[in-house]
Image: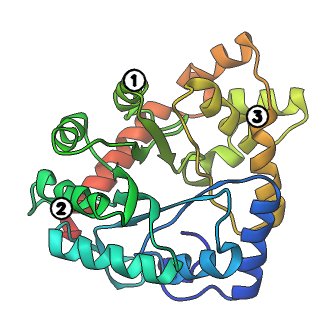
Amino acid sequence: MGLTGPGTWGPPRDPGEARSLLRRAGDLGVDFFDTADAYGPGVSEELLRDALHPFEGIVVATKGGQIRLGPGKWRRNGRPEHLREACHESLRRLAVDRIGLYQLHAVDPDVPIEESVGALALLRGEGKIEHIGVCNVTVEELERARAVADVASVQNRFSAVDRASQPMLDLCEESGIVFVPWAPLGGGRLAVSRGAIADIARRLGVSHAQVALAWLLHRSPSLLAIPGTRSPGHLEENVGAASLELGPDELAALEQPARLGFDARMLARRLRRRARRLGRRLR
């Protein structure tokens, strides 16, 4: 998402630099890349194709169900006919015959989730996609989706400062579903946080972001974090978090919101209110 232009609209300032960053990620062993047709729109998928095609040993996860109206402007569209067209366009841009993980980007309030996921099930039956995922869903919506088709992954916002999707993570772990937290660094807040994260980072000689990502990876074997970056340095830093071991005392400190340096619960409530206001405007 971050490799496109301002407002997730248009190409990046330096497309060659973006492609080099993607290739560097592949060299570092990253084998899961999350994108969407709405990023650009189309720009992110094309950059991935140019940098990493034919995607040997790599899973490309893309999404459909959002229409772009301009920089920073989004509208949900979960109609089956739109999702079918969007999937075909993603196949074309990625230059593949089948997409490893195709996700419903967001639930359209005007379309039952059963109809949207049913369209993805038909596409899977045709061999156009391998696995189905859903994003930004409630537990109830996930259960309705699973009544229509097998769901391989759920992508919801989740981080040390926004744990509202903990019940979803618990359900995914119980059900063998991959949980993909977006904004795993709290929109960048955790990279510059104070409190326990800063104390642990200083003691271990690592960055704040690495501590926040390591906390996520320790939290559940079902969790697959997707930190985004525009910087080679931050990319290498993020990948390094996978090998960071946190001890029981450090994990216990990170479980206490009051020790993170700010009121995480209050921040989470504000983020949820902001998301609801944004959702109303987009409708």
Question: Does the image show residue 41?
Answer: no
User: Which mark's residue is nearer the viewer, 2 or 3?
Assistant: 2
Residue at 70 percent of width and 69 percent of height: 230
Residue found at the far top of this picture: 248
Does residue 199 appear left or right of residue 225 in this picture?
right
Tag 3, which secondary structure? helix
In the rendered image, residue 78, in percent from the top left (x then y), is placed at 19, 66
- Could you give the CA–CA distance between mark 2 and mark 1, rounded to whole angstroms? 25 Å
Quadrant of the rendered image containing residue 216: top right
Badge 1 crowding class, 10 Å Cα cut-off, few under 14, some 14 to 19, many 20 or more, is some
Label 3, on which residue?
198
**Residue name at image x 21 percent, y 76 percent:** 82
Above or below for 120 versus 45: above
Q: Which mark is residue 108?
A: 2
Residue flagged by tag 3: what amino acid is it? Ala
Residue visible at 39% across and 23% down in the picture: 170
Left or right of residue 76: residue 6? right
The CA distance from mark 2 to mark 3 is 39 Å
* Residue hosting label 1: 170
Amino acid type, mark 2: Asp
**As shown in the figure, which amino acid type bears the numbered disc 1?**
Asp
